[in-house]
Amino acid sequence: MTDIPYDKPRVVRFRLPLGFLSDLLHGAMHLVDLVVVPVQRRLGTQRMAYFFVLPNLLIFAVFILLPMLLNFYYAFTGGSALYPQDRPFVGTDNFEALFNCQNVFSPNPTTCQEDIFWRAVLNTGTFVVFQVGGMVLFALVTALALNRKIRWRGFFRSVFFYPVLLSPVVVALIWKWILQRDGLLNALLIAFGSDRIQFLLDPNWARFWVIFVSIWAQMGFYTLILLAGLQSIPAELYESAQIDGASSWNRFRYVTLPLLMPTLLVVVVLSLIRAVQVFDQAFALTGGGPGTATTYVVQYIYNTGFTSTSRQAGLAAAASVVLAGVLMLLTVTQLRLGRRAEVEET
Amino acid sequence: MKQHRLLILLVVLLTVLTVTLVAAQDAVELRITWYNDGNEGEVLRELLDRFEADNPGITVVLDDIGYADPNVYHSTIQAQVEAGDPPDLARVNNVALFIGDYLDLRPLVKDATYYETSFSEAVLNSLRAGENDTGIYGFPLQFTITAPFINRTLFEQAGIEVPSDTRDDVTWDEWAEAAKQVADATGTPFAIAYEPRGHRFWGFVISEGGSWFDEEGNFKVDSPGFRTAAEKLIGWNQNGLSDATIWANLPDGPSLARDQFTNGQVVFLYSGSFAVGGLANAIGDTFDWSAVPNPSGPGGSTGSPGGSLLVAFAGTKHPEEVARLMDFLTQEEVLAEFSQRSSFLPGHLGLAEKGLDYEANADVLKVLSAEIPKIHEQAYRLQYSEYAFTYNRPIDNRLSQVIVGDLTLDDAIIAIQQDVDEAIKNAQAG
């Protein structure tokens, strides 16, 4: 056996320093052991779970639980000071101010102490009804279409999901450029000989576009959930129904809809919770206007607590507590419906 | 040999590190919370560079946190102040918010009398806690006044004379009519853009004969002058003379109004001296524009005063360095350069009297300077009241609702009064 002479390769190849990384990892694990082993000896294996969730619990306590408790306390205080100890206790004054309204369906300064709050409540109610209704309907229709064996199915699934990936503010700015007085849509209308429409100036148009843009931006997410629900329906059921001579509508009515109902309930409740919290996208699109036509409850809270002249944090906190109550009610409903669906399935 | 070299390198590195650490301990960093209307931040930065060169060991950082909403801007500073970690200095205009938290510069500055003689007593008083407080807490960086601007090129194209070129007492109605004629003749979309802020509306009401205070000195919105001014503003928006979008979308309204003017889409803009730098940059040589005197009425002709102040906070860890910086910035020649290059009306009384040789926009600033002596006493009272900001936002919020049809003017007047009373009550609660 003779050595075969060869030229050294000129290309220097980059090699991952796996050995070094492994040593580093090993060293790091030793460091972790230094802390974890004595703790485990002291607590025992069973209680180590608490040790591992402790960091997350701390973050939750500091950034979520504590602000929630503070907010609750603020709701019973007045003044414009920031620190709780500097704020005078006012009992239920803030809640009384919010609910001091003779006609909540036609709020104005002569009949309601906080007329903007009630306008915001009405706007939010209208938004929730139309946005959730429209969202579920369009998401269902889209999911049904994308569940069929159509050409470019993967492409269409991506297209409908893409807006979900965009930041709400980016979505709002894009649509603002389209809808403003000299925007794309008006340019098209004028090009086709129509009159310009002030989409963001007319209250009804503004409300419509806030709902439309919100549906456009979020629909992909709910479509995906419904699509997963549709694909979990066994194909045999459709085959049996077809053999029994069921029409397309009957197959949808008696096979798809009942079996999709648990998923639909989840979609409805999730979108309801999200709709009640509407703020960022609508605020960036219309600023709450024209007037107060698209001012929703969260914007009322933001304006009252942060941008109003006297920063009425107590009033804002009280409105937050009311909103939290509504959200809690919706969450409990979702949990109950979810449990009922589980019982029915079993 | 190799070990020897390594040892030398290590010693050098340790020495450099030690020197750096010692130097870092001696260095003082002052932070100024800031916002920009135009190019004033750049100008100030150059002045600060000079200060730093003359004062080795002091560095000054300008923290530009934007001014999209005045309340949000001031809330950011307020949170820092109440947390006990304020900036060393800040540019503010809602000065009442921080009374009691300012650093008294009187014992720290070289010559406190210079401050008292160089700056308006009303402005210095606006930072003080009461009649017995004689502290010096800051100084006015600029003086502002609200006023109209017109697109002269459009007037020329329409062949219509600018009313204020031949006489001073042009009424609001005459301006509206002239702007409408120009817009019609030139195919300009809008005649008037009025920035949607209550502060811009104070002068309009006074010029229409309105009064903002009752006999006991309390804020009172309802007056014939308020109704006249409001009806005119609402009418312009409803009759298409103005783009109602400006008042319908309050957060973006002022920038939208200025954008329309700089894009040649409106003939007459009601804004103020604070906008000059931004307008000049955006317009460039596109068309000729100028400031014109505030329109007049039965109550005379007045704009609303304003301005921003540079204040020092008591929570600073470097009061002496802060005072040294204040002494530098308040020098007449420094303020003159700052105002000239930023197109600002000076808050320094001596400079205001002498007049400045502005590098740019000299004609515009000359007209605006001439508006200052005409400012009505009530406009000063509103601006330098501790509730100045309270008198501002409820007006534009509620007028906006009237313009889009949410409220009647009667309801809006009730609402503004309620909002202001409630806000004052809340502020007095602590």
Image: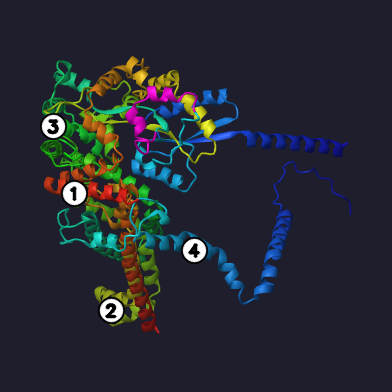
Mark 4 belongs to chain: A
Q: As shown in the figure, which amino acid type bears the numbered disc 2?
A: Tyr
State how far apart marks 1 and 2 are (Cα): 55 Å
Please check the rendered image and state whether residue A283 is part of the magenta-colored stretch, yes or no.
no
State how far apart marks 1 and 4 are (Cα): 40 Å
Q: Which mark is residue B208?
A: 3
Q: Nearer the viewer, mark 2 or mark 4?
A: 4
Dot 2 falls on a residue whose secondary structure is helix
The answer to whether residue B69 is visible is no
Residue drawn at 86 percent across, 37 percent down:
B4
Q: As shown in the figure, which amino acid type bears the numbered disc 3?
A: Glu
Dot 3 falls on a residue whose secondary structure is loop
State how far apart marks 3 and 1 are (Cα): 21 Å
Q: As shown in the figure, which amino acid type bears the numbered disc 1?
A: Ala
Mark 3 belongs to chain: B
Say which of A87 and B112 sits in front: B112
A36 over B16 or under it: above or below: below
Residue B136 is situated, as x and y percent measured from the top left of the image, at 42, 31
Q: Quadrant of residue B194?
A: top left
B86 to the left or right of B206: right
The residue that mark 2 highlights is A254
Q: As shown in the figure, which amino acid type bears the numbered disc 4?
A: Ala
The residue that mark 4 highlights is A61
Mark 2 belongs to chain: A
Say which of A303 and A343 sits in front: A303
Are the residues under badges 3 and 1 in a single subunit? yes
A195 to the left or right of A136: left
Task: Pick whichever of labels 3 and 1 is earlier in the sequence.
Answer: 3
